[in-house]
Amino acid sequence: MGARKIIIDTDPGQDDAVAILLALASPEAIDLLGITVVAGNVPLALTSINARKVCELANRPDVQVFDGCDRPMAHSLVTAEHVHGKTGLNGPDLPSPSMQVQETHAVDYIIHTLRREPPNSVTLCPLGPLTNIATALQKAPDIADRIQEIVLMGGAYFEVGNITPAAEFNIYVDPEAAQIVFQCGAPLTVMPLDVTHKALVTKPRNDAFRALGTPVGVAVAEMTDFFERFDREKYGSDGAPLHDPCVTAYLIRPELFSGRKINVEIETQSDLTRGMTVADWWRVTDRPANALFMGDLDADGFFALLADRLGRL
Ligand code: BDR
Ligand code: CA
């Protein structure tokens, strides 16, 4: 099988950055057509700069980056500087990018690409709030049937929430968008907190990145060092979860992950539980399955893959 064509939709974010680097380091498995940027961890102006900084860190200024939506569909933007720092990419001192963004809006790029490429040959990889993807689906409903798969980071079942007691950040920021995506009918694979909270950057794993001795290895160690401080205090765990790289790792080594095909609905009405992914893990309803919802991961295999691939850049 050849490399899988993907669009990464992202709000970098240190963990988004590692997910992008992993994709760029794996050309035999992943053909990265473009990066679409959305507001999330920090406002759009910063996520756009950060996406380009990451491409330049990987010596890939040729990657096309498209700016997308600067706010959620129905609510004002909630950001996460308390996790990612003021720039969204605190940790390494990366130079301002000289790459420019493309002129096309991210939503139009997603639509054009899905219409241009053969049906079911492009996978969407959302790593942030789902605003760009849902807006594209709303503007061009025909694209839903042309998507090969959507593999996203978002939601939770057993781990419940990280931005509120009931909701995970990406879904909470734009639940209306999430509802559109979860109901669009395209094959959907979800990396919830249940998986990503097992992808912990322990000290030896962080040391392995730094030991690569390359600009990428050192920058990744500095990124994970940064959000480690916050997460260690919050979760009391031995390292911070590396959420978004679970998406790109899945495209390379799907056997590292296991889950269930179940029904997942998004709560959009309740003030208390807004953005909750109501996942029918125990299959107690007869609602049809709409997602492969992951529950477990081979963490050692995941970090071995990451260190190996990042070492190529
Ligand atoms: C998600 O929220 C962001 O802070 C991370 O980049 C990740 O995509 C985890 O809840
Ligand atoms: Ca993200």
Image (tube, rainbow, N blue to C red):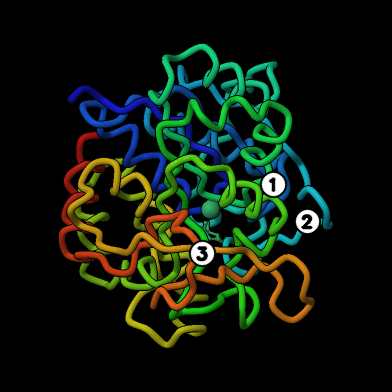
Q: Quadrant of residue 103?
A: top right
* For discs 2 and 3, the disc positioned in front in the rendered view: 3
Q: Which residue is mark 2?
A: 77
Q: Is residue 223 visible?
A: no
In-front residue for pair 232/137? 137
Report how far apart the C-alphas of labels 2 and 3 lie in the structure: 31 Å
User: The N terminus is located in which quarter?
Assistant: top left
Do the residues bearing badges 1 and 3 touch, measured as CB atoms within 8 Å? no
Q: Which residue is mark 1?
A: 39
Query: Who's the residue at 16% across and 55% down the image?
Result: 304
Q: Position of residue 98 (x, y in %)?
A: 58, 23
In-front residue for pair 59/213? 59
Would you say 260 lies left or right of 66 here? Answer: left
Crowding around mark 1 (Cα neighbors within 10 Å: few <14, some 14 to 19, many 20+) is many
Q: Secondary structure at mark 3?
A: loop
Report how far apart the C-alphas of labels 1 and 2 lie in the structure: 8 Å
Q: Secondary structure at mark 1?
A: loop
Q: Position of residue 265 (x, y in %)?
A: 58, 63
Q: Does residue 219 sit above or below 105 in this rendering?
A: below
User: The C terminus is located in which quarter?
Assistant: top left
Determine the residue located farthest toward the front in the rendered image: 286
Q: Is residue 102 visible?
A: yes
Crowding around mark 2 (Cα neighbors within 10 Å: few <14, some 14 to 19, many 20+) is some
